C-alpha cells in the first residue's frame, strides 16, 4: 500500500465537555494538516477536509468490541503496564473510573467517525465495518526511546508526552520510522518539528500509528475480546522495550491464550 496515495486519519480523543481537547490530524495523499477542536461531532466535522474519506483511522482511546462487558480487563493494558513499561509509558486501566470514561469517549468517537472509513476491517481491528485501530501515543513514542532518554531527571506532571515527543522528533527516530514503513513524507516531519500544541501533537502520532497499521508492519498487542494497541514495527523499538515485552508475554498465565504480537 503506497502511503502517499491514500488518506489516513489520527484522532486524540480528549473528553472535556467545555474545552477543545480533541486533536485531529490527517494525510490526504501525503498532504498533512491537523486541528484542535471539541468533542461534539458538529465542531469536529467543521475542521475536517470536506468530503474526505479515509483508508484507515487511528483513535487514541481504549477500543473494545461492542459485545465486550464494560468491566473487562484488557490484556494489552496488562502487558504494557508491567515491568519497565510501568514507569515509562504504561496505559491506564480502562475498566473503572476515569479510564472507563475515556473508553466510553473513544467508543463515541469511533461511532462519529466510522462512516468516514472507506476500507473494510482487517485482522486485529476492533470493528468489522471499517478499519479503525487503537493508538496509544505515549507507548508509541516510549518504545522508540533509549534507556538514557528516560534518565533526564524528574518530568513535571502532565509533561511526559511532550518530553518524549520532542526527544523522538529531535533524535531523527521519526524519520527512521518512516523509512521502515516506506513513507518518505518530509511535510509530516516538518509539521511535527514545528507544532507546539499538545493535542495536535498527539493526533500526529495517531496519524503515524494509522500509517504503520496500513503498511502492514505495525506491532499490535492484545487479544480479540479486549482489543489491541498498535505500536511501531519491532525493528524500531529500543532494546529495553523489546526485552520488556518478551518478559511480560512470558509472564502471562499459562492458563490464558498467549496474546498475539
Image (spheres, rainbow, N blue to C red):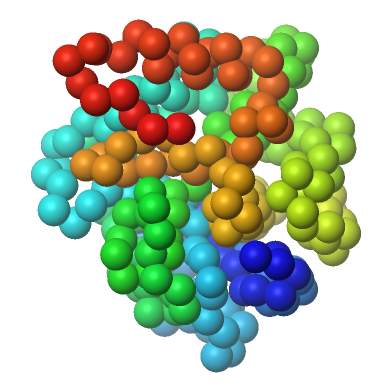
Q: Which is more toward the observer, 10 or 8?
A: 8
Identified at 49% across, 43% down, the residue is 230
Residue occupying the point 63% across, 38% down? 233
Residue 96, by quadrant, is top left
Q: Nearer the viewer, residue 34 or 16?
A: 34
x and y, in percent, of residue 82 in the image: 41, 14
190 left or right of 183? right
User: In the rendering, at what x and y percent does residue 24 appear?
Assistant: 57, 64
Q: Is residue 194 above or below residue 73?
A: below
Can I make out residue 199 in this image? no
Q: Quadrant of residue 76?
A: top left
Residue 43 in the figure: left or right of residue 114: right
* 34 relative position to 136: left or right: right
Q: Nearer the viewer, residue 156 or 163?
A: 163
Q: Position of residue 14 (x, y in %)?
A: 45, 53
The quadrant in which the N terminus is found is bottom right
Residue at the spot 34% in from the left edge and 29% down from the top edge: 259
Q: Quadrant of the C terminus?
A: top left
Tell which residue pokes out farthest to the bottom in this image: 51
- Residue 165 percent across, percent down from the top left: 71, 38
Nearer to the camera, 232 or 160: 232
Whether residue 148 is visible to the viewer of this picture, yes or no, is: yes
Residue displayed at 50% across by 18% down: 245
138 vs 70: above or below: above
What is the quadrant of residue 231 in the picture?
top right
Amino acid at each position: 500500500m503506497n502511503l502517499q496515495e491514500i488518506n489516513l486519519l489520527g484522532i486524540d480523543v480528549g473528553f472535556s465537555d467545555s474545552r477543545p481537547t480533541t486533536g485531529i490530524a490527517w494525510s490526504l495523499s501525503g498532504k498533512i494538516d491537523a486541528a484542535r477542536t471539541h468533542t461534539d461531532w458538529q465542531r469536529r466535522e467543521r475542521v475536517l477536509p470536506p468530503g474526505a474519506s479515509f483508508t484507515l483511522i487511528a483513535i487514541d482511546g481504549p477500543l473494545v468490541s461492542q459485545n465486550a462487558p464494560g468491566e473487562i480487563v484488557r490484556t494489552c493494558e496488562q502487558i504494557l503496564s508491567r515491568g519497565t513499561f510501568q514507569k515509562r509509558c504504561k496505559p491506564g486501566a480502562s475498566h473503572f473510573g476515569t479510564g472507563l470514561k475515556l473508553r466510553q469517549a473513544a467508543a463515541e468517537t469511533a461511532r462519529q467517525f466510522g462512516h468516514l472509513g472507506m476500507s473494510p476491517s482487517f485482522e486485529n481491528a476492533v470493528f468489522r465495518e471499517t478499519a479503525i485501530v487503537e493508538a496509544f501515543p505515549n507507548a508509541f513514542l516510549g518504545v522508540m526511546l533509549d534507556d538514557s532518554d528516560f534518565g533526564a531527571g524528574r518530568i513535571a506532571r502532565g509533561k511526559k508526552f511532550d518530553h518524549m515527543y520532542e526527544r523522538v522528533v529531535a533524535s531523527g527516530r521519526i524519520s527512521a520510522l518512516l523509512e521502515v514503513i516506506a513513507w518518505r513524507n518530509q511535510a509530516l516531519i516538518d509539521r511535527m518539528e514545528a507544532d507546539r500544541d499538545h493535542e495536535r501533537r498527539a493526533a500526529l502520532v495517531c496519524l503515524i500509528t494509522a500509517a504503520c497499521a496500513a503498511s502492514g508492519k505495525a506491532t499490535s498487542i492484545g487479544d480479540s475480546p479486549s482489543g489491541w494497541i498498535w505500536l511501531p514495527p519491532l525493528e524500531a523499538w529500543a532494546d529495553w522495550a523489546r526485552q520488556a515485552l518478551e518478559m511480560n508475554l512470558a509472564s502471562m498465565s499459562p492458563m490464558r491464550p498467549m496474546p498475539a504480537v
